[in-house]
Structure formats: structure tokens, C-alpha cells
Amino acid sequence: MSGSDQAVEALHAEVRVYREAHHARLLRELDAIAADLTEALLQPEVRAAGHQFAYRTEAWG
């Protein structure tokens, strides 16, 4: 494998790590938003029964 091939592979690996970290950060933010909405909008007895707001991540692939 040539030096330029190794450089391209290293760059691709960096991009993958960055994307995964970004994706994880977005999911944490969505979790926090869903928890805030659950707390703010659902009555305590509804929350106590286990109901909560959630989001779908199928579109993330």
C-alpha cells in the first residue's frame, strides 16, 4: 500500500470516528430533549405509569 493510500485510509478512519462521535452527541441531545418534554408536558401520574416522549431513529440509518 502506498503512502497516499495510507493517508486516504487514515483520513477516512478519522471521518468515521468524527461521524460516530457526532451521532452519539446528537442522540444524547435528543434523549435530553425527550426527557425535558416528558417532565414538562406529562402529568406525574402518567410519567409514573412509565409513559414518556420518545423519538424514532430509523432515518439515521
Image: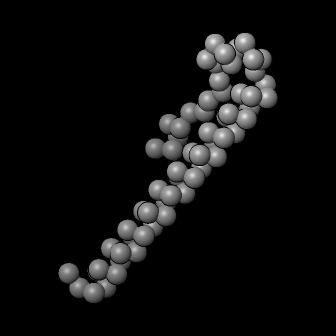
Is residue 1 shown above or below 41?
below
Residue 41 horizontal/vertical position (percent): 79, 25
Residue drawn at x 71%, y 27% as measured from the top left: 38
Taking 4 as reference, is 38 left or right? Answer: right
Residue drawn at x 66%, y 16% as measured from the top left: 48
Q: Nearer the viewer, residue 58 or 30?
A: 30
Residue 14 horizontal/vertical position (percent): 42, 70
Is residue 25 shown above or below 5?
above
Residue furthest bottom in the image: 3
Is residue 35 shown above or below 61?
above
**Quarter-wise, where is residue 54 in the image?**
top right
Q: Nearer the viewer, residue 18 or 48?
A: 48
Residue 35 horizontal/vertical position (percent): 68, 33
How was this image coloured? one colour
Taking 17 as reference, is 5 left or right? Answer: left
Residue 59 horizontal/vertical position (percent): 53, 40
**Quarter-wise, where is residue 52 in the image?**
top right
The quadrant the N terminus occupies is: bottom left
Residue drawn at x 46%, y 44% as measured from the top left: 61
Taking 42 as reference, is 16 left or right? Answer: left
**Total labels drawn:** 0
Residue furthest left in the image: 1
